[in-house]
Amino acid sequence: MNRLKLLACAGLTALALSACTGDKNLAAKDPVTAAKDLSVAFRANDFDRLTHIMAPPEDYAKLEARYKDKQAKTPAPTDEESKQFADQLAEYTAPDAEAKLFAQVQPKLAQMGPQIPMGVAMMSGIMGQSIEQNPKLTPTEKDQAKAVLTAITKWATTAKLDDPDKAKQAIGVIVATARSLQLTTLADAQKLSFAQVMDKAGTGIGGVRKALAVYGFDTDKMLDSVSVAKKSQDGDKAVVTVSYTIMDTPVTFDLDMVRRDGRWYSADLLKTVEDSLSDKPAAPTGIAPAAAAPAEAAPAEAAPAAAPEQTQPAPEAAQPPAEAAPAPSAASDASGNTGA
């Protein structure tokens, strides 16, 4: 009898998991869960899912069709382009890639050390002035942006960006990431499907996040600190409040959500997708945490792009804006609830 109960439970569990998996690429039916699901996808580096739940299925189909159309019109790579791709790929995937890359970086680390404080202060000042003078930001959004900038500036001045050991570790992460992309030739890269491009983009971003963690910028910790709560709802429009902590600095912002065909989407992300499909310039989005924002502060040589430049480019809307960065609490992350 107990054995039958166990088998029944196992069957029900498998059925539930199957149902959940089937709906994982559908946006949620309530605004809070929809906002959390964007975060869950980003936290998992699941850009395929992220692209699906950024916009309604018909918009995703248009993105995919547009990508296929551009792909079909892309000419076959020349011998020179193929060679350049292969050479760049080898820099990050060859058996001795770690040693060669570190040999290139090591002499520059000592030179950049004394320049870091001045460089960080200069960039912080420029970005702070840009935020203050941006007429499209509300006073609240400016305060949020300044809080994020302050946290990143604090990190950059204490991260030991010139540390050779950390550079070795970061290079190891980037090389491992490049190898895991399993790219072969430029011709094959240009044949990747839209979903495959999104999958590899997620792998690349995951590598950048791991490299940042080497320098003490733990994006997992930041994303795990996020909580989402409903602030208001009026018909097919809602506002949710997103809170998170970046380098011990608390940040809170409101995120507009809209309902389409019974499912909820970030208003800014949806507009970005729809503007890209109509060839209109994308409107600036609201202030939100950008997990990979401090990547520029790390030594460029220590964190090169995971994918060579000649790979087939993703469509304009495929790269998720910064609003996708927040992640739900640990409980929500573990549940993976899509609200479907």
Image (tube, rainbow, N blue to C red):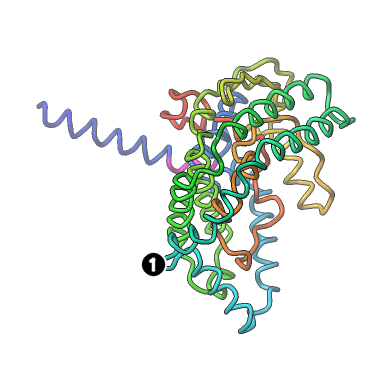
**Number of marks present in the image shown:** 1
Quarter of the image where one finds residue 331 = top left
**Left or right: 7, with 166 as reference point:** left
Quarter of the image where one finds residue 108 = bottom right
Q: Position of residue 4 (x, y in %)?
A: 14, 31
Residue 315 visible in the picture = yes
Q: Position of residue 165 (x, y in %)?
A: 44, 46
**Left or right: 136, with 38 as reference point:** right
Is 183 rendered above or below residue 38? below
Q: Residue at x 56, y 58 (%)?
A: 197
Residue 36 or 96: which is nearer the viewer?
96
253 falls in the magenta region: no
**Left or right: 5, with 234 as reference point:** left
Residue projecting furthest to the bottom: 79
Is 239 rendered above or below residue 16? above
Q: Residue at x 74, y 25 (%)?
A: 146
Q: Where is residue 9 in the image (x, y as percent from the top left)?
A: 24, 30
Is 229 rendered above or below residue 177? above
Residue 144 or 64: which is nearer the viewer?
144
Badge 1: how crowded within 10 Å, few (<14), some, or many (20+)?
A: few
* Quadrant location of the N terminus in the rendered image: top left
Residue labelled with disc 1: 95
Magenta span of residues: 21-25
Q: At label 1, which amino acid type do we have?
A: Pro
Residue projecting furthest to the top: 231
Residue 55 visible in the picture = no
Main secondary-structure element of the magenta-colored stretch: loop
Q: Residue at x 66, y 61 (%)?
A: 67
Q: Which residue is drawn at 68% across and 30% down?
A: 288
Q: Where is residue 310 in the image (x, y as percent from the top left)?
A: 63, 68
SS label for mark 1: loop
